[in-house]
């Protein structure tokens, strides 16, 4: 197929493109920026503007002023129309392989997005957030800066994510609450389907495993997800919905 770049796109200095990359009309790509093989960048997407931080230079990357930590886009990523991804301030803002960032979504500086994740239309993710593999964030949700969303979690449409979200949790509402577990996501990630019930039982009991202690054997292959969760430092997780406790 080969790399295809619309003549109406702008590709600045310091941009490295993999093979078979597609870039639509009106897209603006500013360095430092690396884009993996077979990535698809939609019309009007804007990748690589400086961090929105008053303490940092608002540099002219389109004129070759490559002052910040960059953006890295993995292989087979899809960035849809009018999405915005900003440069990192101390680490590259990153979009993991095979992830989708849908139209009008925004990833601020220093965000780390895992693999196979979906950031739906209109979602805004604040600076320094860390989002794990296979996370799905619903349309128009807002993620507060420095929040952690662990792998396999699902965030409902319009949810203001003001606290951290544990693995495979389903979260929605204002204020956000854990309302269940992503059982379909657990299976799709290759885990035994029975683990969903075990995980739900722990969440209903208020066990979110944020410390350094033991993880129960009944969580089986999910223990790796909790090792990642704990590795993110001090966590302030969302609460469990009262209605979920009553149902159980």
Image (cartoon, rainbow, N blue to C red):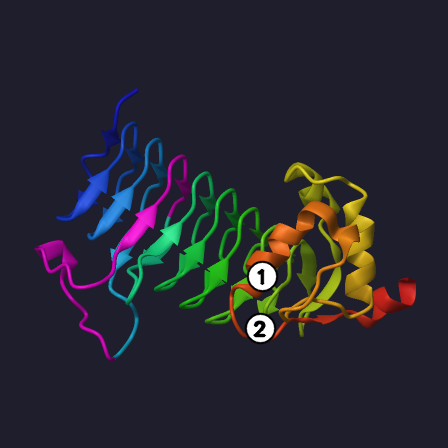
Majority secondary structure of magenta residues: loop
Which residue appears at 64% of the width and 71% of the height?
211
Tell me the SS state at disc 1.
Answer: helix
Q: Relative to 159, is 145 on the left or the right? A: left
> Along the line of sight, which residue is nearer the eye, 135 or 186?
186
Image coords of residue 178 (percent x, y): 72, 64
Q: Which residue is mark 1?
A: 229
For label 2, the SS is loop
Residues in magenta, as a range: 55-81
Sooner in the amino-acid sequence: mark 1 or mark 2: 1
Residue closer to the observer: 14 or 26 = 14
Task: Name the residue: 53% across, 63% down.
Answer: 231
Q: In this orientation, which residue lies closer to the viewer: 194 or 74?
A: 194
Location of residue 18 (image quadrant): top left
What residue is pinned by disc 2?
A: 235
Q: Is residue 228 above or below residue 2?
A: below
Disc 2 crowd rating (10 Å Cα; few below 14, some 14-19, many 20+) is some
Q: Is residue 218 magenta?
A: no
Q: Position of residue 185 (x, y in %)?
A: 67, 44
Estimate how packed mark 1 is, as few (under 14), some (14 to 19) or many (20 or more) residues with alpha carbons within 10 Å.
many
Is there a contact, CB below 8 Å, between mark 1 and mark 2?
Answer: yes
Residue 82 as seen in the image, left or right of residue 153: left
Judge from the rendering whether residue 19 lies leftward or rightward of residue 235; answer left or right.
Answer: left
């Amino acid at each position: 197929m080969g790399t295809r770049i619309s003549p109406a796109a702008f590709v600045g200095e310091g941009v490295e493109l993999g093979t078979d990359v597609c870039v639509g009309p009106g897209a603006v790509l500013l360095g430092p920026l690396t884009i993996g093989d077979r990535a698809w960048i939609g019309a009007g997407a804007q990748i690589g503007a400086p961090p929105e931080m008053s303490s940092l230079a608002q540099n002219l990357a389109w004129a070759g002023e490559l002052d910040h930590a960059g953006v890295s886009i993995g292989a087979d990523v899809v960035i849809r129309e009018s999405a915005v991804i900003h440069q990192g301030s101390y680490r590259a803002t990153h979009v993991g392989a095979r992830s989708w960032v849908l139209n009008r979504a925004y990833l601020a500086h220093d965000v780390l997005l895992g693999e196979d994740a979906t950031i739906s239309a209109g979602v805004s993710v604040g600076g320094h957030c860390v989002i794990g593999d296979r996370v799905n964030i619903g349309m128009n949700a807002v993620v507060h800066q420095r929040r952690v969303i662990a792998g396999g979690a699902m965030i409902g449409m319009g949810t203001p994510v003001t606290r951290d979200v544990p693995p495979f949790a389903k979260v929605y509402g204002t204020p956000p609450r854990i309302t269940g577990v992503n059982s379909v996501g657990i299976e799709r990630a290759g885990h035994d389907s029975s683990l969903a019930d075990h995980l739900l039982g722990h969440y209903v009991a208020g066990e979110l495993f944020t410390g350094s202690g033991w993880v129960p054997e009944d969580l089986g292959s999910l223990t790796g997800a909790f090792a990642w969760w704990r590795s993110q430092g001090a966590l302030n997780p969302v609460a469990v919905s009262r209605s979920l406790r009553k149902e159980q």
